[in-house]
Image (spheres, rainbow, N blue to C red):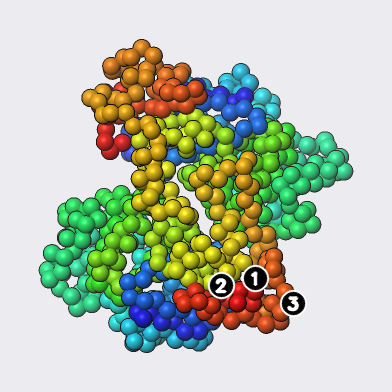
Amino acid sequence: MSLQVTDLRVYYRTLAGDVQALDGVTFGIADGEIMGLAGESGCGKSTLGNSLIRMEGRMRHVGGTVTLDGVPLPIDDQDEMNHFRFAEVSLIPQYAMSALNPTRKIGKMVGELLATRGVRFRDIREELERRLELVGLARDVLDRYPIELSGGMKQRMVMVLSTLLNPSLLIADEITSALDVSSQRAVAQTLVEFRDRGFVKSMIVVTHDVSILYQISNTLAIMYAGKLAEKAPTDVIMSRPRHPYTRLLISSLPEIGVRFEEQRLTGIPGTPPPLLNPPTGCRFRDRCPIAIARCAEEEPPFVEIEPGHSVACWMAS
Amino acid sequence: MLTLERVSKTYKVGLFGGTDLPAVRDVSFSLQPGEVISLIGESGSGKSTIGKMILRLLSVNGGTITHDGTDIATLRGSGLRSYYQTVQGVFQDPFSSFNPIFKADHVFGLIRGVYFGSASAADWQRRLEDALEAVTLDPAQVLHKYPHQLSGGQLQRLLIARALLLDTRYLVADEIISMLDASTRIDVLNLLGDLKARGLGILFITHDLSLGNYISERTVILRRGRIVEMGTTAAVFGHPIHPYTRMLIASVPRLHEKWGQIDAGVRAGSGWTPAPTELCRYHGALPDGATGGSLAGPAGSGLAELEAGHFAGCVAPRADGTCGGRPSVAA
């Protein structure tokens, strides 16, 4: 098991109280696994990604543990965590286009970044150039300023840079959302290639776009209101989802070939509950078509119903 | 009917506007009441520029946009006011379309002030309730609320309701569901379908091919300001002709089919792959069989009609729009 997250709780401090953005999340990622993480806005998927690498000031680690390759990650200690960042855990940020320092030539910026990890630029230059070539960038980008690169080139540069030290875990947060369909596909396939070549051991791909995840991820985790609703191998979750939220989510996605006149899709009525004072019991029950009395009283545990397939629903087991 | 005829738009960019940036070139199509046309293109293809020109938020550099025979560029005063009564727009970001210091229904008040100053309170109330009902919103839930108290789907539907308060017959919907969550976007999309059934003509601008395919009868594919393919949605998605359209369709992530399978399917199933020749592959299909120069498509748009109502552009156009003569592998 490359990454093991156990009962992780991260709350946001606000004047009105704690917003329980991540409330008891448990999952593991195997070596070489790409896990897709999907959910509506505000479900806590970005909070999960961020808390594995850098907690914002208003985020508070309330409970739970994270271990990476058997070593506990000190996720609530900014200074300790710094030893792991970039080398062991790395991030491709959502706005990769603005992630590069505009006042430095790219090569110089890479050199400075490596120096903070005690790596000499000239030792790694050869490998860097090989990887640039792999993503279709000429080696002279290192002598250019970020402003001279197009958005897609910057995105690829950041991808190479984030994975340069062969981190164990890579977190890709909504990296395809701002791209056109053709570049979306190229970026997604590059992620798979990086995994295949062993540049990164395992990956969490956070996005709201389930169809991208179907293309590239090995397992798929669906989050709802701060909790995991379901996690299973991608083919299993797409062909026989067990959580009603997953089912409704998948059936609400239009696909090429589905036409309004012929087959009318429906959305999920209602909105997710507020996480400031979340309701007791199952958080999806107000929107759930198959909710029973028990759902209001007891919270369904996230249990494994078959190997590798976990669901948090009373009606699934 | 809204008709665009060889519409072009050039932006002035660079220092002192010294450089011309052609954003839209020779675009011609028309929108009827009761149909949805999806205008699909990647970023920078000029799709939003076309929407803004129809709404007269931008001027037209070349060609004309006519509404029932009247050139909209000539409209002034009351003529323009009645144009806006029939043509309205809704934009991408519902969260920033509202003024956060006013309640959300302030947008309705603005309409009342301009168009219904003399309407009685009861009359106005009835109109408002009709519009809200059309977008399936419960007045009690959305009126007298501030924007931050409403969800993105509710705000976007309020904006559509605002557009419907007038005697709207055409709606320019520019990426209106891109910012919404998967669980609510389909409801807004279905709403557009219902409004279409009530006789509204909708220009659905999007970069998302699966949404366009779901809702529209006709599809226009734009690339770098030019139409590359245009026809019924079934034809454009069923057997795309232009290599660019095929590439786009093959790139769309799907739910039950991996990219590798799609590549094979698009190539094998299309049946539209003529043998590579030295010349642009559509010249054979042109009425005059010309071997170079301008493509003699409808309204001089650089398009050739390859089946009834299904048009495609040159594979390798030169900068001025004439045929480059050679098929380009990369196109």
Left or right side of B320 for B221: right
Front residue of this view, candidates B29 and A253: A253
Q: What element does badge 3 sit on?
A: helix
Work out whether residue B25 can be spotted.
no
Circles 1 and 2: CB atoms closer than 8 Å: yes
Front residue of this view, candidates B264 and B282: B264
* Figure quadrant of the N terminus of chain B: top right
Q: Say few, some or many: other residues with alpha carbon within 10 Å of mark 2 (under 14 / 14 to 19 / 20 or more).
A: many
- What chain does badge 1 belong to? A
Give the number of the disc on residue A284.
Answer: 1
- What chain does badge 2 belong to? A
Residue receiving disc 3: A293
Front residue of this view, candidates B140 and A290: A290
Work out whether residue B227 can be spotted.
yes
Using the image, determine if residue A222 lies above or below residue B26.
below
Label 3 is placed on what type of residue?
Ala
The first of marks 3 and 2 along the sequence is 2
Q: Say few, some or many: other residues with alpha carbon within 10 Å of mark 3 (under 14 / 14 to 19 / 20 or more).
A: few
